[in-house]
Image (tube, coloured by chain):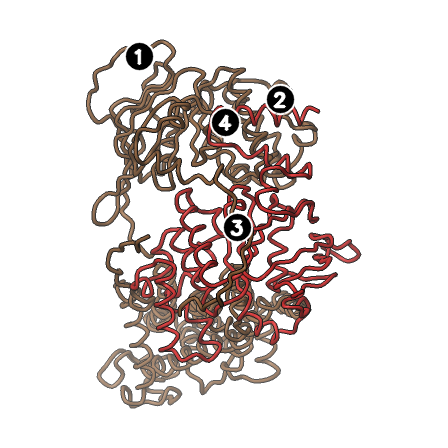
Chain colours: A red, B brown
Amino acid sequence: MTSPLLELDDVVVEYPGKGRGKKPFRVLHGVSLAIEPGETLGLVGESGSGKTTLGRAVLGLAPVTGGEIRYEGRPISRLGKRERRALSKDIQVVFQDPFTSLNPAMTVMDILTEPLLVTGVARADAEARVQKLLDHVYLPQDAARRLPREFSGGQRQRIAIARALCRDPKLIVCDEPVSALDLTTQARVLDLFIEIQEATGVAYLFVTHDLSVVRHISHRVAVLYRGDIVETGDAAQVTESPEHAYTKRLLLAAPVPDPERQARRRAERLRQAAS
Amino acid sequence: MTAVEFPPAPKRDGLVRRALRDPLAVGCLVVLALLIVASLAAPLLTGYEPDHSVMADTLAPMSGSHPLGGDGVGRDVLSRLLYGGRTSLVGGTLAVLVAFAVGGPLGLISGFYRGWFDAVAGWIVNVIMAVPAIIVMLVVMAAVSQDLNVAMVVLGVIMAPMVFRLIRASVIAVREELYVDAARVSGLGDGRIMRRHVLPVVIAPSLIQATQVFAVAIGIQAGLAFLGLGKASQASWGAMLGDAFTNIYNAPALLVWPGAAMGLTILASSLLGNVVRDALGTAEPRVVRRRKRVERRAAAPVAEAPADRLLTVAGLRVGYPKPGGDKTVVDGVSLTVARGEVLGLVGESGSGKSQTAFSVLGLLPNEAEVTADRMVFDGKDLLGLDLAALNALRGRGIGYIPQEPMSNLDPCFRIGSQLVEPMRKHLGLSRAEARAKALELLARVGIPDPERVFRSYPHQISGGMAQRVLIAGAVSCDPRLLIADEPTTALDVTVQAEVLDLMRSLQQEREMGMILVTHDFGVVADICDRVAVMQKGRIVETAPARQIFAAPEHGYTRMLLDSTLEGGPARGDLRVPDKPLKEVTS
C-alpha cells in the first residue's frame, strides 16, 4: 500500500499563554487525517474550531507542539528554515482574503514571478510561465502589468491561485478561498479549482465553513469541532446523512434557497433543539 | 469561460513623481537646494573668514564690503550666515543618519523577529527615552567635546528610539499581512521577504520621520549654540542669534538673518515631510461637494398610499462625485414595505443594495448625492428632513442592524450604557427604567446572563452575542421599520440560524416592517415575504418570495439562483487517473 500524500498523526497545536505560568492555549487536540494524491479533503468547522490553524500547521506557519505531520512519508512538522523552504515547491496556499494576500505595491507579474525567481529560474523563463499561468486561470495577458487593486475579488483570487500553481505543487492548502466572494463568482472559482485539479492531479486541503461548498469540491470531508475531528467520510455521506450530532446541527442550520424546504428544515432544527 | 475585458492599464506614477506635481514640494526642494549650494559655495560668495574679527567693523551697517553688515565683535554677518549654514546642515544630517543607523536596523529586527530581541531592544529604547535629552547634551559638551557635531551625534542616539518605534510598528503591521505569509510559503527567505515586502512599506514613513528629525536637530543645535556652547571657531546660526541678542537694542536687524535662515530651513524640511505624507495617502484626487439632505428631484404627484404602507421609496438615485463624472451606484430604485412585511433586498456586491438601505436611514457619507422622487415613511415625508428630525426618526421610527457586530459597538463603553443611552434620549426614560428595560431586552434576545452582559465590554462577548445585543438595541425604542444590512454574514451558520429565528420572532411579535439586505438566497428563503433583486443599481425584479424561487422572471435572478451550490450533486469519489499527470502549463 502506498503512503498518503499528507498524513497528520495526532497533531497538537498550542500557543503559549499570555504571561508567565499561564497554561498554553491548545487549538488542536490531537488531529489525525490523511490526504491522497489528487484528492480534495474538505475540512469543515465554525470559527474557532481550529480549521485555519490546521491549514497553517501544514504550511509551517503554526507551531506543532505534539504529534507529527508527514509529507510523502517524511516528517515535516519540525523542519529547519532551509528544509521548509525546499518544501515550498510541493505545498502551496490560497488564502481567504484576496485583498490582503497580494502585496498591493507589486504588479501581478512581480507577484507571480517571485516564487520562481527565488529558485533561480531566469527572468525571461519566469515571465513566459506567468503568461501561461494567467491563461490557465482565465485572466487576460495584460493583467501582468497591473496592480492587485485594479481587480475584483474573484479576479484577485485567480491571481492567488496562479501564484500557488507557479511551481507545480502536489498539495494546495485552500483556506476559505471562496467565502469572501459573491455567489456567482464563488461557483466559477470553485469550478476553476476542480478543472485545475483534474488537469494536474494536485491535492487540496480545502478549509471552509460552508457545507454546500465542501460538498461541491471535496471527495472526502472531515468535520472539526473545537479542535477535534468529530466525523470523517465521503462528501456525499457527510453532507447528506451525517452521523455526529454536531454535523447534523451544522447541516440543519444551513438555510436552503427554497421557502418550503427551508420551513421544513427550520421546523426539524427547532424540534431537535428542543429535544 | 472567456477572459474578462479590462480598460487599458492606467498610468501609474511613483511617489517621487506624485510629490513633484505638488508646487509646495518643488518650493521646499528649491529652498533646501539653495541653502545647500550657498553653504557649500561659502568661500566663493564671501571673502571673509567667519571668525575673522575686525574691531572697526563692529556693528557695521550694510555696505558693499559687508552686504549684511558686521556683528557685535566685528565679524562679517554674511560670511557667518553662510558658514553657519554648513554647521546646521551637517549637524541635522548627522543627527538623522545616526538616528536611523541606530533605530532603523533595531526596529527592523525587533518588528520582524519579535521574541527576546524585541524585549531587550524595547527595554533599552525605553531607558534612552527616559533620559532628558538637553541635559545629556549639555553634559557631553561640557565634559567630552565642545564640538557641536558631537552633540548632534548624541542627539541622533537620543532620537533613535522614535525611529525604532516607528519602524518596528510598521514592520509588525506588514508582518501580519497575508501576503508575507504567502511569500514565506512561496519559499522566500527572511532576507528576501524583508527586502521585497517589508522595506518598501517602511521607507515612506521613514522619509517623513527623517524630515522631522532634521528640523528638530537644527532647532536644538541652535539652542545649544545660543547658550554659548560650541567651539568659538565654529560659526553657527545659534551663535549668531546669541550675538544678536546681546546687541538687540543697538542692531536689532542682526536677529533677522539667522532667524530667517533657520525658519526657512525648518519650514522647508517639515513641509516636505507633509507633502510626502500627502502623496502617500491619497492615490486619487477627491472631489468634495457637501450636501446633507436627500433632495427631491421633481414634485411628484402624491398618490394616496394604502393604509398598511410603511415605507415608500420612488426614483431613488445615489451618486458619488468622481473626477471625470459622477459615479451612479443606485439608479432609480423604487420599493415599498408594508407593516409587518419583510422585504429582502438581494444582489451581488456593488449592486447598490446597501446604499439603498443606507439612504433610507440617511447614513450615506457626506459626498454622496442622493435624490428621490418620493421617500415617505409612515405618512411622513423623509425628503428634506433636517438632521434633528432625522435623528428622532432614526431612533424611534427606524432601527438598524449592521453586518459587523463587533465594529458597531463602541469598545470604550460597557454594553449596558450603549443600550441605555438611546432609550433615555428617545423614550425619555429615567436611568433605572432604561436599565430595567435593557435587561429585559437582553433576556428577550436570548442572552443567558443579561446582568453579566450588561456590565461587559464588547470585547468580552462573542460575535453572535454582540449581534444579539445590537438587535436588542435596534428594537429598544420600538421602531416600526428595521433595516438589517447582511445581519448574519459575519456569523457561523449555527449562530446565523438562531439570529434569524430571533429576528423573525421579534418582527412578528411587534409587527415591524423589515428590509433585509443579503446576498444569500438561503436567508431570503428563511425569512423574507417579498424579494427585490438588484443589479448594477437597479431593481430588476420584485416578487413574493415563493414566486422568486419557483418562477424567477428576470434572467439575472435565474443566473443568481443557478449559482447556488446548495442541493447540487456531491463531487463523488476520487478516481485515480490512469494516465500520468501532467504539469499545469505543458
- At label 1, which amino acid type do we have? Ala
Nearer the N terminus, badge 2 or badge 4?
2
Labels 2 and 4 positioned on one and the same chain? yes
Q: Quick one: which residue is furthest to the right in this view?
A: A21
- Element type where label 4 sits in the image: helix
Q: Which residue is mark 1?
A: B305
Q: Which residue is mark 3?
A: A176
Query: Residue placed at 63% from the left, 34% from the top?
Result: A249
Query: Residue placed at 46% from the left, 55% from the top?
Result: A193
Nearer the N terminus, badge 2 or badge 1?
1
Nearer the N terminus, badge 4 or badge 1?
1
- Chain hosting mark 3: A
Labels 2 and 1 positioned on one and the same chain? yes
Label 3 neighbour load within 10 Å: few <14, some 14-19, many 20+: many
Classify B461 as above or below B270.
above
Classify A266 as above or below B141.
above
Report how far apart the C-alphas of labels 2 and 1 lie in the structure. Answer: 34 Å
- Element type where label 1 sits in the image: loop
- Could you say where residue B217 lies in the image, as x and y percent from the top left? 47, 72
Q: Which residue is mark 2?
A: B444
Q: Quick one: which residue is furthest to the front in this view?
A: B578
Instruction: Please name whichever residue, B262 or B548, is drawn nearer the observer in this view of the structure.
Output: B548
Report how far apart the C-alphas of labels 4 and 1 lie in the structure. Answer: 28 Å
- At label 3, which amino acid type do we have? Glu
